[in-house]
Amino acid sequence: MSPTHDFTHLDERGHARMVDVTAKQPTVRSATATGVVRCSPEIVAALRDGTVPKGDVLAVARIAGIAGAKRTAELLPLAHVIGVHGAVVDLVVGDHGVDVTATVRTADRTGVEMEALTAVAVAGLAVVDMVKGLDKSVELTDVRLVAKTGGKSGDWHREP
């Protein structure tokens, strides 16, 4: 077997392709991803006090993350267009910055891991965008999948 047959997103000539999931049955699936926006103590104080000049950072980031989940297939060329049937984006301000968690759910033919990761990344970037004027050193880090359920491969959880 040639090496290209080991990769589902490559055809027999080694060219990128979208995997055909037409024959798969829709099943309930979910994925959760996390990330961290690391901020200075001054930004953390402004977030807690609600004094960031651009407005309600967490509300904007929450909506941005949900929108990101819904638009994942537009951003990632080989991602399938799937129904995002539920998306929750939570942001918690801590002493180090903002912890971002997104859980995305669907009843479709393929998983929502990329949608959860995109939700976290876009929500985190929205935080960065809204506070960067206060401190240019703000950064988005540690974006990663922490759990997925459903589908052929079953459930998976990242070890702590």
Image (cartoon, helix red, strand yellow):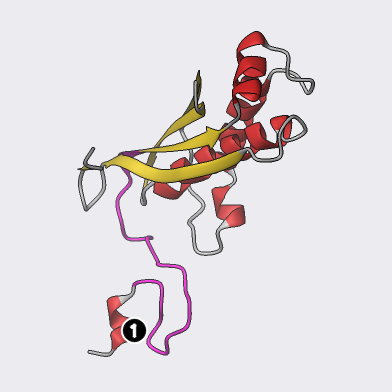
| 18 with respect to 159 (left or right) | right
Residue identified by numbered label 1: 4
The kind of secondary structure element at disc 1 is: helix
Task: Say whether residue 122 is visible.
Answer: no
Is residue 53 left or right of 29 when viewed as pictured? right
Which amino acid lies under the numbered mark 1 shown in the image of this protein?
Thr
- Disc 1 packing (10 Å; few <14; some 14–19; many ≥20): some
Is residue 11 covered in magenta? yes
Q: Residue at x 63, y 40 (%)?
A: 125
Q: In the rendered image, which quarter is residue 102 located in?
A: top left
- Is 52 above or below relative to 105? above
Q: Position of residue 9 (x, y in %)?
A: 40, 72
Residue 124 lies in magenta, yes or no? no
Quadrant, the N terminus? bottom left
Q: Residue at x 34, y 72 (%)?
A: 8
Main SS of the magenta part reads: loop
Among all residues in the image, which is located at the extreme front?
A: 41
At horizontal 56% and vertical 63% (from top left) the residue drawn is 77
Q: Position of residue 44 (x, y in %)?
A: 60, 21
**Apparent side of residue 83 relative to residue 25 in the rendered image (left or right):** right
Q: How many marks?
A: 1
Q: Of residues 85 and 135, which is closer to you in this image? A: 135
User: Quick check: can you spot residue 10?
Assistant: yes
Instruction: Residue 67 in the image: state x and y as whole percent.
Output: 61, 36
Q: Quadrant of the C terminus?
A: top left
Determine whether, in the image, residue 152 is placed left or right of residue 140.
Answer: left
Q: Which of the 4 image quarters holds residue 142?
A: top left
What range of the chain is rendered magenta? 8-31
Residue occupying the point 69% across, 18% down: 56
Q: Where is residue 154? Give x, y as percent.
A: 20, 46
